[in-house]
Image (cartoon, rainbow, N blue to C red):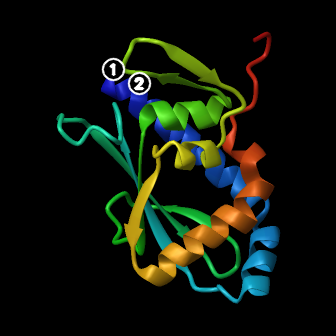
C-alpha cells in the first residue's frame, strides 16, 4: 500500500507544481508587492496516518520545493535542506486534493467537510510547520495573500464520468 500512497503523492506534487508554475507571474507580482522576494525551500513531511498521532510509528513521505524569486515553484531532491518544514498527513492531502474531508470523532461519529481547503486543514490542526521566524511570516503571507488565488490549483480535476 505504501507504493500506492507514494504514487498518488508524486502525481499530486507534480500537479500542484505544474499549476502554480503556470501562475508564476502572479506569485512574482505578490512577492514584489509584499517585499518578500527571498527564495525559500519548503520541505513537506506527509505522515501516512495522522499528523496529530506522534505516539505511533508512521511512514513519512518527504517532498521539497523551491519557491523562487521569480515566482517559480520547482521540485527539489527530497532531502534538500529546508528553510521551513510543513507537516501534514495523507488523509489531509487527499482531502485537499478532492475538496472534501471526513472528520472522525472519538465517539465513532463522523462529519463530511465540503468544501475542504488548506485553510480548513490548518484550522483543524492538520497542518503544522517549523522554521525560521522570517520564513514562518512568509508562510503566513502565502496563506493570507497567495493561497486564495491558488485554491483551485490544489484541487485535482474531476475524473471523466465521475
Position above or below: 160 against 90: above
Tags 2 and 1 touching, CB below 8 Å: yes
**Which residue does the image show at 59% across and 69% down from the upper left?**
140
* Residue 46 visible to an observer of this rendering: yes
Position above or below: 158 against 26: above
Q: Nearer the viewer, residue 117 or 44?
A: 117
Occupied quadrant, residue 116: top right
Q: Position of residue 69 (x, y in %)?
A: 65, 82
- Which residue was labeled with disc 1? 1
* Residue 67 visible to an observer of this rendering: no
Distance from the alpha carbon under mark 2 to that under mark 1: 5 Å
**Which residue does the image show at 67% across and 44% down from the upper left?**
154
Q: Position of residue 80 (x, y in %)?
A: 35, 67
Q: Nearer the viewer, residue 149 or 69?
A: 149
Q: Position of residue 11 (x, y in %)?
A: 55, 38
Position above or below: 149 against 111: below
For mark 2, give the secondary structure.
helix
> Outermost residue toward the front?
107
Q: Which label was assigned to residue 9?
A: none
Q: Which label was assigned to residue 4?
A: 2
Q: Quadrant of the N terminus?
A: top left
Amino acid at each position: 500500500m505504501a507504493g500506492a500512497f507514494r504514487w498518488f503523492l508524486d502525481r499530486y506534487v507534480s500537479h500542484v507544481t505544474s499549476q502554480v508554475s503556470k501562475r508564476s507571474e502572479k506569485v512574482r507580482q505578490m512577492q514584489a508587492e509584499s517585499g518578500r522576494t527571498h527564495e525559500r525551500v519548503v520541505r513537506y513531511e506527509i505522515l501516512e496516518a495522522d499528523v496529530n498521532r506522534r505516539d505511533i510509528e508512521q511512514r513519512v513521505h518527504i517532498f521539497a520545493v523551491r519557491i523562487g524569486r521569480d515566482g517559480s515553484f520547482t521540485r527539489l531532491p527530497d532531502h534538500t535542506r529546508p528553510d521551513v518544514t510543513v507537516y501534514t498527513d495523507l488523509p489531509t492531502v487527499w482531502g485537499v486534493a478532492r475538496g472534501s474531508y471526513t472528520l472522525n470523532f472519538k465517539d465513532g461519529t463522523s462529519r463530511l467537510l465540503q468544501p475542504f481547503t488548506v485553510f480548513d486543514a490548518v484550522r483543524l490542526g492538520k497542518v503544522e510547520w517549523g522554521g525560521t521566524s522570517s520564513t514562518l511570516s512568509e508562510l503566513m503571507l502565502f496563506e493570507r495573500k497567495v493561497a486564495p488565488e491558488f485554491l483551485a490549483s490544489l484541487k485535482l480535476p474531476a475524473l471523466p464520468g465521475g
